[in-house]
Each structure stands twice: as C-alpha cells, then as structure tokens.
Amino acid sequence: MTPPAAAAFPMTPELVRLARAVGQEGGRPVLVGGWVRDCLLGIPHSKDFDLEVFGMEPERLKGVLTRFGPVHTVGRHFGVLKLNTKDGEYDVSVPRRESKTGKGHRGFWVTPDPAMTFEQAAARRDFTINAMGYSLLDQAFLDPFRGYEDLRAGLLRHVGPAFGEDPLRVLRAMQFAGRFRLSIVPETIAICRQQNLTELARERLWEEFRKLLLRAERPSVGLAYAPELGVLTLFPELERLEALPADGSGVTPWLRTLAVVDRAATPQERGGAAEHAHLVLLLAALSHELGRTQPGLGAAPYDAALAEAGAAPTEKWLTRLTSELDVRRRTPPLVRNLAQVAALYACRGNLPPGALPRLALKVPIAEIARLAAAREAVLSGSDAAPQAAWLREAAAREGVWEKPLSPLLKGRHLLELGLTPGAYLGELINEAYQLQLDGRLTTLPLALAWARNRIERGELPRTPQGAV
C-alpha cells in the first residue's frame, strides 16, 4: 500500500522550529499517537502535538524545550514534558521501556531509553492505528505494524503481546471502535476477554465512556462490542438489559436502546455546560429501558411505572461508573420522567393544570424533549417526533422551556406587607407557588392581592405571636 504523502501531515511554523532545534542537538523528533491517526482519517487537526524524541537524554531535551516556553514534567519517573505556547500544546517524551509490576492501569515500571528504535517504542502501544509516526526532520511516515492498512480496512487490531498487560485497553477498544467505526479483529477480542477489568479505577472507566459517548457520531458501534469484550460484567444492570429477548416489535431492548443513543448523539459544542448536559442526556438514553430488567416488567408497555422502575438501576450502574455526583443526580430523573412526555401528549387537549410547570421542576424540559425525540424517532423509524415538538411549543407557551417558573411571591414581599419573620412564611410562599404553577396566579400584583386577602382574613399557616 502506498504510504501517505507529507501533505497529509500539516505542520505549524513553530512545530518546524521546535523540530529543527531538537535535531540540532542530536535528537530525532517523531509525531506519534492520535494526531497522526486523525490526520490520516481527515479529522481536522488540532494544535495538540504528541512528540517522541529519539537519541536524546531527557534533561537535554528539556533544555531545548525551555527555549520555547515553560516546561512541566508530569507522570511517574520521567513521564512527559508538557510545553504550552500561544501556538500549540506539546506533550514530549523520550521512548521508554515498561515492565509490569502490579495490577491495573498504573502497575508499570517505566524506564527512559533514548537508544530505542521507533519500532521498539511503537511495540508498547495498544493498537496498530496508534503505533504510526511521522518523522519531522526527514518527512518520513513510519508504520512498522501496518496501522495505515488497518485504518483503511476499518479494522482495530492490537500491536503485540504487551497489549494484554493493561486491562484499560479493553475499554479503549470499545471507545475506538465507536469513535472511528472500526471492526475489532477476533484475536484482539479474545485477548480482551481474558482481562480482569475489576482492577481498573472508576475514573479510568468513566474517561473511556465519556470519550465514546461525546466523540462518536454513532456510539452504538462501540457499545455493541461491550458484551463481547466483557465490559458489561462491570455493570450487571446493563448486562441484564442486554440479555433480554426481543419483544413484540421483534427488536431486543438492548438494540433499541443503542438506536436511541445514536439518535441522541447529535454534534455538540466541546466543553462547558452544554457538553455536560449532552453527556447526561446520552447516559439517560443508555439507561432509559432499565426498568425492563425488574421482575415482571420485561415485556411491559413503556409507561410511568416502567420508567420509574428504571431509576434505581440507573443510579446503581452510574455509581459504579463515575464519582461525578452531578451526573448521578441529573440522569435518573430523566429516566424516571421520560414516559410523561407521551402521557401528557395523549391528553394535550385537556391538560391537567400545572402539568408542564411541575414537570419542569423535576427535569429540564429541553433535555427530556431531546430524549423523547430520540426514542420517538427510533420507534417510528423516521425523523418525525410530534410528541417532542408539541412539548417544546407547549412548554414555551407556559414559560418553562428553558427553566422552571420562578416564584412570584417571595419572603421580602410578605415582610413588606407587615408579617414578622418565621417558618410559616415559607408555607405561605409555597401555597402561592402551587397556585402559580396551576396558572391561577400569573403576576406579582395578583400574588400580592392573594397574600393581603389571606392576612386580612387571618388565614395564615401557624400564625406566630405578634403577626399582623
């Protein structure tokens, strides 16, 4: 196979200067890892560069890098030199030998060895598509394990025997298969199934799931490998869902779940609150059928009881997956309330007072509408989602599409009316808020008039001594 041309690897002026500076001191800088892979896949390249420098001692290398900016060392032993400039972020290392010394992802002893060849250094990497390099000074593409060929064929293959020393690579296999739509070769699957995944820290599991869900256009490609790779043994709740037989539709709940995840996986902005909310949404999509794993509910219709039954197993599997409390707090309510969208749509001509404002207190309407639209589209087999579209319009009319209603009546208003401080004020405010949710108090003047009337008639909850 003809190797890629140099034009496939666009350089920045600063990267060229850095490479030449390293070369003048006797080093051979090679771009490695995801940057090389992404260039070959046509993914827009970033200015985050992974460099491996051969033939140069770590301290001498650090001296060269400091000419370009402050350098920080991270990781055990030698680790990685991090250089951040206004034009790029560089993770720079020398080749190193690794010896397995304990369990898990961190159970290795690392020794820098600048005399290693690129092939020797690449042999410690996980997959052939991550074992490619681009030598900057001579503009040579390096591919000792035929990763380019596997990439073109859509295959994910481990590099060599060292693959089985790190159980985290099982999760990375799932993640890469999903992100790049690759088929994992049988020999790699066989090694993955032999790994003890219980050695892995929860944070490592979470990071791989995050990357799969947030960076894959179709996360289902990776998630479909989870049972075969042994990943679901870590999450019995998902394992039970995957084992359920097909229902009346002829589709298993697991496959339908994966289809909903794909529908919900629309491109989002990287970072910030929007990405976090999107991640919560995708976890809810992955969890929304878990009620079927409870006794007697495997073939039950998707209603409020089934959705409610799914909240507890959602909490359990997320506790195993992540320590992020906000994720574990926000996801179960989406699962618990998803069936409400169809129920409210069914009675949209005679909607109970306060139904949508009260739903907005339980979950963000915009988020549950997106989740409902994904499920609706899968069930209908089209892009149409009339229930979710109705919810958006109705919630916008009632002012709860973006956030719940804020109480009109507040404590300061009651104090201004002459009431003295006390717990009973909270009860009065809550009564007013319930009327506001029902649409009976729509403005502050109406709320104040309601409160004055209560005061004048002496109808105050647990009126304290001295209250007016």
Image: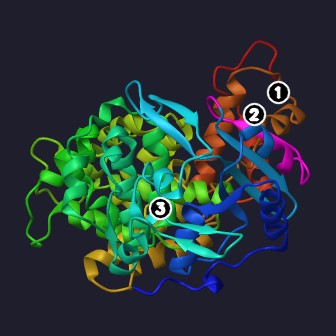
The kind of residue on which mark 3 rests is: Asn
Could you tell me which secondary element the residue under label 1 belongs to?
loop
Residue 130, label in figure:
3
Q: Which residues are magenta?
A: 62-77
**Residue 146's spot in the image, x, y percent?**
39, 70
- On screen, residue 66 above or below 418: below
Q: Quadrant of the C terminus?
A: top right
**Viewer-nearest of discs 1 and 3:** 3
Q: Is residue 390 left or right of residue 162?
A: right
At x 39% / y 80%, what residue is drawn? 152
Determine which residue is flagged by label 1: 419
Could you tell me which secondary element the residue under label 3 belongs to?
helix
Determine which residue is flagged by label 2: 455
**Residue 442's spot in the image, x, y percent?**
69, 59
Q: Is residue 24 left or right of residue 271?
A: right
Q: Residues within 10 Å of mark 1 (few under 14, many from 20)?
A: some
The kind of residue on which mark 1 rests is: Leu
Is any atom of residue 29 visible in this view?
yes
Could you tell me which secondary element the residue under label 2 belongs to?
helix
At x 8% / y 59%, what residue is drawn? 245
**Residue 15's spot in the image, x, y percent?**
79, 67
For this rendering, which residue is in front, 95 or 340? 95
Is any atom of residue 201 visible in this view?
no
Q: Residues within 10 Å of mark 3 (few under 14, many from 20)?
A: many
Q: Residue 191 in magenta? A: no
At x 67% / y 73%, what residue is drawn? 138
